Structures are given as structure tokens and as C-alpha cells.
Amino acid sequence: MSDAQQPTDDGGPGDDDFEPIQVFPEAEEMDLRPGADNCYKCSTCDTNCPVAEVDDEFPGPKFQGPEQWRLKRQDDHDIDDSVMKCSNCMRCDSACPSEVPLSQMHNTARAEYVEENMSKLSREYWRNRMLANYRRLAPLGSMFPRTTNFMMGLSATQWLGEKLLGITGQREFPEFATETFREWWTARGGAQVENADKRIAYFHGCYANYNTPEVAKALVRVYEHFGYEIMVPNQHCSGTPMFANGMLEDARRSAETNVRELAWALEDGADIIASCSSCSMSLRQEYPELFDFEGTEEVAANTWDAVEYLRVHEDLEGELEGTSVGDKFDDFAYHAPCHARNQGLDGQTVEVLDAIDGITAHDVGDSCSGISGTYGWKKENYETSMKIGSEMFEHMEDADATSGLTECPTCSMQMEHGTGYEITHTLEVLEAALVGPAEADGQ
Ligand code: SF4
Ligand code: SF4
């Protein structure tokens, strides 16, 4: 019996002939019925959900996806508000043995819930909209970065953020860089290597531009070391925080710009490279699941994680053999982000760093960090977020290392928040090994 023929015991869509039906208006032409029919209720997704593990009131991904879909189709059933408690970690997506498109269902259900059931005057709506649209606020904050950092660092600001907006006062806001990556890129005169045969388009995302340009610079130096010509196209937010907050129209606008700009880069012979695992996840999986702009599939098929691309197209480990990072770094406690795990990239950093003399990346296991982008910044989720992260914190502290390593900016925040460790991005280690700190600092 095929998955699509699995019996249903709820009088659901398996009981009648297949006819395409638009259940979620937000989903437009999308028909999720074949995916829902694939669910045979094994509950594997539920046992892999980090939120369900620590929050007894969260009904879990099976309910959020196939069951909610069936209820919705049977009558004019409202989307259950628990969909807003899903952190969008996408672990259920990888865990499902039957290819049920769980994250696609969650994203469309969340969008419908926000559109139909959440008051546009509520604090929750405006707080979520702000968090989801970091890209619109960050340029303001980075106009006067020192002043912004000072103001955002005041305990009074954190207190007000919690009282007025519902943004937890337990976390410190990330600092803005004094020079954004794009400012640095322009000041250095753009690409320093011309090579029509080896060209990449760098999707840096918001965080590496406004907050951690050292990660983006490391990517540039490492790729130029391998002789790549780097393009830095115009770009908007990848949409990850918008999907997670049910702001599908905001995500659609960003995605349309990104697909258009990146499709042009493909025409120029470039492949698309991301340094943030959630950005690559979004371009590769969420865009084709949710949108059908011209070029969406091509962009998805030609997007790579920065380290993955070098492993496939270059002899990265061979180039790293015999290199060292001197005193710059020591051993790391490494956390593979859920969105890297979802792309099958959870083992690559440990393997790659193994080629560098004198340092080791200790994998701290497959637990979720718990912050999941904007999720752990919401006051009502803070405790749950820290409960989920506790396993990772313990394993980091048990590892033979005093600093952390990851590829996701918000996992990095949570790792630092839970342990006090300094956190590094894998590209910065590759930069130190291949380019050297002296050369890197001078450019
Ligand atoms: S893991 Fe997949 S098949 Fe199993 S209950 Fe969840 S959605 Fe259904
Ligand atoms: S995306 Fe993560 S939090 Fe949401 S239902 Fe799936 S496993 Fe649970």
C-alpha cells in the first residue's frame, strides 16, 4: 500500500476521490493534500520536536501539519493558535519518514492564523512584525552604531522592551558593527579577483552585513584564496524570520527581490553561496515550497552553503592539511544548527577542522539550541527556549573546549547566552588557517 493510500480513521481526505482544493487562501495555487495523505500517524515528527519535548501544552508537528489540514478541510475550522508556538526549527521536516511537507504546512497555516485570527492592533502582532523585519530596522540602528549599542545596552531599554513590546529583557541585544559588510566591500573596491570561470554570488543576509561583518569578510578572503570572483548582489532578508512569524506577504516581497537578483547572477555564471545556514535553507527549500516567481527553482538548485561548496568544488581538506591557526583559536565546542542538519550538513565542520593542525571541533550532539531565530526573543518563549537549550549548554560545558563554533547567528547568540563562551563562525577559522590573520587584518 502506498503512503497516499494509507487508511484514515477520521473521515479525512483519504475517504473520497482526490480533487485539488485550496484550503489555505494564503497558499494560492498550492495543494497540500497529497502531502497530508502521506501521513500515517507514526508520530516520529512529534518525538523529534524540541518544543513538544519541554512544553506539554504544545500539540506537536503532527497536529500542526496533517491533522490541522484535515480539520480545516472538513469545515471552516480556525487555525489553532498553538501554531504560533512552533519555533520553525524544521526538525520535524527531516524526521518524517513519509515526506509530509510539514514546514510548508506550518508556514501556510501560520500565515493564515496571522491574517485571519491575530488582531492587527495587538502588541503581539506589532512585536512579531518588528522582529520579523529586522532588515528594515537594522539600517537605522547602524547609522549611528555606537549610540545605538549604548542605548540598546542600557538595562532601562531592555526593561522597556519587555514591558512595552514583549521582547525578553533577559537577553542582551546584538551589537551593530561600526562598518557594515557592504560598506567595507565598497571601500575595498569590490572583488579583487576576476575570473569568469569561477564566480559566486554571495548572499550574506542581514546579520553578517549589520552585526558580524567579520564572517562575511572571512568568506570573501577564503573564496578569493581559491581564485573565485565574488559578486555581492542587492538583496533583502532571506525571509526566515518572516516565515516563522506568519508574515508571508513580507516574505513574498523579500523573496521576489532575492530571486530576481540572484537569477541575474546565475545568468552571469555565478553559483549562489550563503554563510548562514538559515539563509541557505530558505533559498533552497522554503522559496520553492511557497513561491513560484520566475527563476525560483533555478535559484534553489544553485544555492550552496559556503563550506559545502568548497568541499564539492575544491580540495578544501587537502588545502587545509598542514595549516594551523596559531594562537588565534583553540579547541571548539561545535553546535550544528537545526537548519544545517536539515540540509545534511551537520558533520562537515568537524571533518573540515580535523585537517587543521592543533585544533579540534568537539560536536556537542544533535540537540536544538532553542532560540530558533526570533522565537527565543519573545518574552513568553524565553523559558521554553532556555529549557530546550539546556542540553546543548551542558554538552558545551562538558566538551574539552572553552569557546564555541557554529554557522547560525542566532544559535551563536544562544550559545553565548547559555555558557558565556565566545562564539566563532567556521569561515573565520578557515580564514585564519588559509589566509592568516596578518593578511586578513590588512585588507
Ligand atoms: S512523521 Fe510524518 S508520517 Fe509520521 S506522524 Fe509525522 S507527519 Fe505523519
Ligand atoms: S518546526 Fe520545530 S518546533 Fe515546529 S513543530 Fe516542527 S519540530 Fe516542532
Image (cartoon, rainbow, N blue to C red):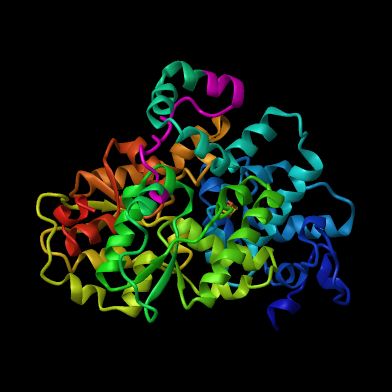
Range of the magenta residues?
160-182
Q: Is residue 220 left or right of residue 210?
A: left
Residue 425: percent from the left, percent from the top?
A: 31, 53
Q: Quadrant of residue 6?
A: bottom right
Q: Please, is residue 270 above or below residue 135 in the view?
A: below
Q: Residue at x 47, y 78 (%)?
A: 269
Q: Quadrant of residue 11?
A: bottom right
Q: Is residue 299 left or right of residue 195?
A: right
As for residue 165 lying within the magenta part, the answer is: yes
Q: Is residue 138 left or right of residue 128?
A: left
- Who is closer to the viewer here, 441 or 370? 441
Q: Quadrant of the N terminus?
A: bottom right
Q: Please, is residue 159 above or below residue 44 in the view?
A: above
Q: Is residue 301 visible?
A: yes
Residue 304: percent from the left, percent from the top?
A: 44, 69
- Who is closer to the viewer here, 38 or 271? 271
Q: Magenta segment, principal secondary structure?
A: loop
Q: Quadrant of residue 100?
A: bottom right
